[in-house]
Amino acid sequence: MLDLILGILFFNVILILFKLFERYGVDNLQAIIVNYIVAGSCGFIFADINLTATEIFNLPWIGIAVLIGFIFIVVFNLLAKGAQVVGMAISTVANKMSVILPVIAAFFLYGDTVSTFKILGICLALVGVVLSSIEKGKLSFDKRYLWLILIIFFGQGIADIMFNYAAKTHVAENHASLFISVLFLSAFISGTFLLIVALIRKKETILPAKKLGKNILWGIALGVPNYLTVFYFFRALESDYMESSQVYPILNMGVIVLSALSGYLLFKEKLSLTNWLGIAISVLAIAAISLG
């Protein structure tokens, strides 16, 4: 349970840093790319085994880690695009509602128990996601961008299913840091490619040097909590304390509750009565799923 709590806390640190990115004019893509190389380096530093590059590339999970890393960076950029064209609220709902996919997969693939409390908690979690994300009483969006919402939903869900599959079947406990490192480095390579394309299309700029230096520093600050978030989440999935059908929704609900409270206390973000109701329902969801 401690691993899950730490995963939620460090995820909240990431969200706080993202909020500060906006305040200090940090370039998201450039800082994220730096963050991935830092997070990937952390994995190699904390790994308790020594393998050559050839041995690493021959490990059974290498392909899964590379693919998940690619999906990570793609979903992040689609989230940014979604925030611009359909709004942050609906993009957040699509991202968080995707939790239903790894939960269903856990029931069928790993024989997770199905209980009344767990089903009730999952239903409450979905309601909590919607209510806590509503802005100005509605979640309407331009239907032309339905494809974008669906890709965010299924992309995040598929990445979570693959991550859980790797944790359950392929990655030995002493390989966790190494697996996470390869995952992040894959995201770094994919992100670098996207940055090069953006530079060629003149959608991004790395000048002046002062701006580049700022983006690098904030990327470094983001990299460590990002690594710790994924590391503790991975350990929670490997643990026998909870089934993965409990870990995923509790993580999402915990992040929603803590991030909403952090935004309210640290950044004076206004929460409507509907948002507070969503947070309260999210807390009930955590309790119900934990009992399940």
Image (cartoon, grey):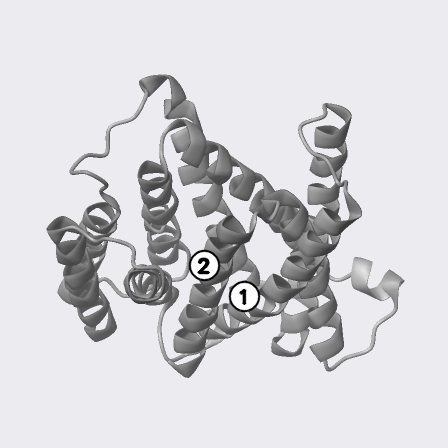
The quarter holding residue 287 reads bottom left
Return the residue at label 1: 230
Do the numbered discs 2 and 1 sit on residues whose CB atoms are within 8 Å?
A: no
First in residue order: circle 2 vs circle 1: 2
Amino acid type, callout 2 = Leu
What secondary structure is found at the residue carrying circle 2? Answer: helix
What secondary structure is found at the residue carrying circle 1? Answer: helix
With respect to residue 126, does 246 lie above or below?
below
Give x and y (percent) for residue 59: 75, 62
Is residue 106 rendered to the left or right of residue 74?
left
The residue at 35%/63% (across/down) is 255
The residue at 39%/52% (across/down) is 105
Pick the residue in front: 46 or 179.
Answer: 46
Q: CA distance from mark 2 to mark 1?
A: 14 Å
Identify the image quadrant of the C terminus.
bottom left
Return the residue at label 2: 15
